[in-house]
Amino acid sequence: MGFCTMFFKLHQLLTLFLLQQHIRFYKCSSNYTMFCADGIRQCLVFDKRKSPCPPQQMLHLDEMFTCRTNCYKLHNRCKVLRSVIVRSEIAGTGSPAAAYKYPDEELQLTSKVKGVCFYAVTSTVAIFLFILMVLGHPFVLLKDRYQRNFHHWIAKLWASMTVCPFFKIKIEGFENLPPKNLPAVYVSNHQSFLDIYALLTLGRNLKFISKTAIFLFPVVGWAMFMMGVIPLKRMDSKSQLQTLRRCMEIVKNGGSVFFFPEGTRSKDGRLGTFKKGAFSIAAKTGVPVVPITLVGTGKIMPAGMEGILNPGSVKIIIHQPIQGDNSDTLCNEAEKVISNELIHQG
């Protein structure tokens, strides 16, 4: 029985070698070995333990496979994982599925160091610029209560000085932006903590919607309050109604508001379902909706991994404004435009 098993293993390996491909070896754990061949979409997984389950499996790498826990139990740092997911390092090349790349320890360390430097830079710049904001705040309240151009100019300067040493931002469709003095409702996909930095570099007086807890953060939270960022308590219907009323007031007085219609950051890069709050404001006030697609922020700083900063660049695509008096139509059109652009960008 053992001889037949070993023969089958050798047969599978010989098949891979005959394809004249380079074999990649991955040690998934102390109990599993995986062989992947460049250019082909299959891999071979060997279980090195004595088990009633088959000691090897041939997996097709365009799909995701799970090994049932009643057959395989992998121990990782004394924790039993519920499943083992095997993917090809090259499966994403030429296919819709994104390839999972095995993390390199040196690259991980570099990303963590860059993350620390990023927060050091943004904090230092914020402290100095916050002083200017405080000094100018009384004049802003007297002369420019709704748009607050001076504060937004400082915010743009802060965002630009922060991201400049770490990654580049490319803007497409800048001509589609409405003039600064024209109110509008801006909407965008949400992938990362870096989305705010990227959007602030556009130089528009956008009133963002933010969780009330963030306003308690020193310097940054206080600056948001002075900029006129609109607080929102999640899962509180009264707070949501107050937020919509505040947005309506800002738009009617010549200001612009910004929404992430998904409501939260996407962890896998896929576009979530849009909520209709932003589009009801646009429909009731008659202002245009400006869809914006953000590409790359989720790869540089993924959601839930705010302590690292991976290499990469960011692209901001500004689409033509959409106008109408039906919130459902506006919502569907904006979601379709952003979704198609994300698919186009890959």
Image (cartoon, rainbow, N blue to C red):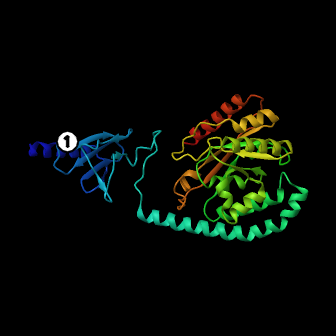
Q: Residues within 10 Å of mark 1 (few under 14, many from 20)?
A: few
In front of the other: 329 or 111: 329
Residue sitting at 65 percent across and 37 percent down?
Answer: 275
Residue 91 showing in the rendered view? yes
List the residue tagged with mark 1: 53
Task: Specify whether 204 is left or right of 271.
Answer: right
Residue type, numbered disc 1: Cys
In front of the other: 263 or 111: 263
Q: Which quadrant would residue 115 be assigned to in this image?
A: bottom right
Number of labels in the image equals: 1
Residue sitting at 86 percent across and 59 percent down?
Answer: 140
- SS label for mark 1: loop
Residue sitting at 74 percent across and 34 percent down?
Answer: 280
Task: Specify whether 113 is left or right of 293.
Answer: left
Q: 318 above or below 120?
A: above
In x, y percent, where is residue 282?
77, 36
Task: Specify whether 157 is left or right of 26.
Answer: right
In x, y percent, where is residue 47?
22, 48
Task: Specify whether 271 is left or right of 141.
Answer: left
Q: Quadrant of the N terminus?
A: top left
In x, y percent, where is residue 184?
79, 42
